[in-house]
Image: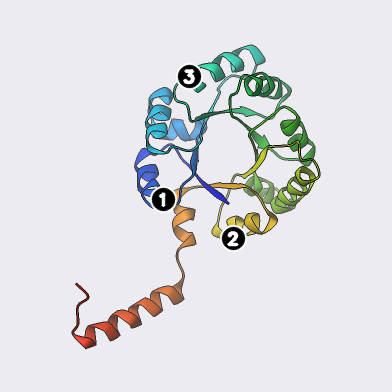
Amino acid sequence: MKFFIDTAEVADIKAMAETGLVDGVTTNPSLIAKSGRNILDVICEICDIVPGPVSAEVAATDFETMLAEGRKLRALRPNVAVKVPLTWDGLKTCKVLADEGTKVNVTLCFSANQAILAAKAGAAFVSPFVGRLDDIGQDGMQLISDIVEIYQQYPDFTTEVLVASVRSPMHVTDAARLGAHVATMPASVLRQMAAHPLTDKGLAAFCADWAKTGQSIL
């Protein structure tokens, strides 16, 4: 499973990239707004840190402007994946960009039907939002299960399931069990995945026992 970091904060991306566990980054207009920086500058900086796909989202909602924005974003760096919304105009944009050899991340997916359309349009990634479905009383992971099952029936579908709106390590575990290709998450969730009280307790005991020996490995 690939891990993407869902942020536009360059410091967090640098810190996580240094672990060697980060395969890509996803951003969106809301995350860019929080950073308070110019979107083009931020995308270029992130792409220079992480060699994997960096999703940069268009801001327009009509086909012609989305296509123009997508072409401008992809020209920034070779590892840019243009992100478009799962609307008719977004799907049209995806099809054109994909046919031109651009990786496209179709975002704001909330149904299996939408995911089928994204795959038909040639999306490199489709982003179902599990946390937002959970928020309204629906089962976000059931959607992941449905999409993975459907995609497995059709070898011609090359779209990867990119689980988004991840709120906790359990979301990541559940997505991995279902066979999702990618999970994108805040840096805080990735850090939480390494945490366990028994690990801390065991390490403290090992350190205490080692100190009693008076030895040094170096």
Q: Nearer the viewer, residue 204 or 102?
A: 102
- Dot 1 amino acid type: Gly
Q: Looking at this view, is 40 or 17 the one in front?
A: 17
Residue in the foreground of this view, choosing between 166 and 50: 50
Residue 139 in view of the camera: yes
Looking at marks 1 and 3 on the same chain, the residue that comes earlier in the sequence is marked by 1
Q: State which mark lies toward you, 2 or 3.
A: 3
Question: Mark 1 and mark 2 in contact (Cβ < 8 Å)?
Answer: no
Asked if the residue at tag 3 contacts the one at tag 1, i.e. Cβ–Cβ closer than 8 Å, the answer is: no
Q: Quadrant of residue 33?
A: top left
Vertical placement of residue 170 versus 156, above or below? below
Q: Earlier in the sequence, mark 2 or mark 3?
A: 3
Q: At 69% from the left edge and 22% from the top edge, which residue is drawn? A: 95
Position in image of residue 108 (x %, y %): 65, 35
Q: Answer yes or no: is residue 128 visible.
A: no
> What secondary structure is found at the residue carrying circle 1?
loop
Q: Which residue is mark 2?
A: 170
Q: Position of residue 2 (x, y in %)?
A: 55, 48
Residue 92, quarter of picture:
top right
Q: Which mark is residue 75?
A: 3
If the image is split into quadrants, where does the C terminus sit? bottom left
Return the residue at label 1: 20
How far apart, in angstroms, are the residues tagged by discs 2 and 1?
21 Å
Q: Secondary structure at mark 2?
A: helix
Colouring scheme applied when the structure was drawn: rainbow
Label whose residue precedes the other's in the sequence (2 or 1): 1
The picture places residue 62, in percent across and down from the top left corner, at 65, 16
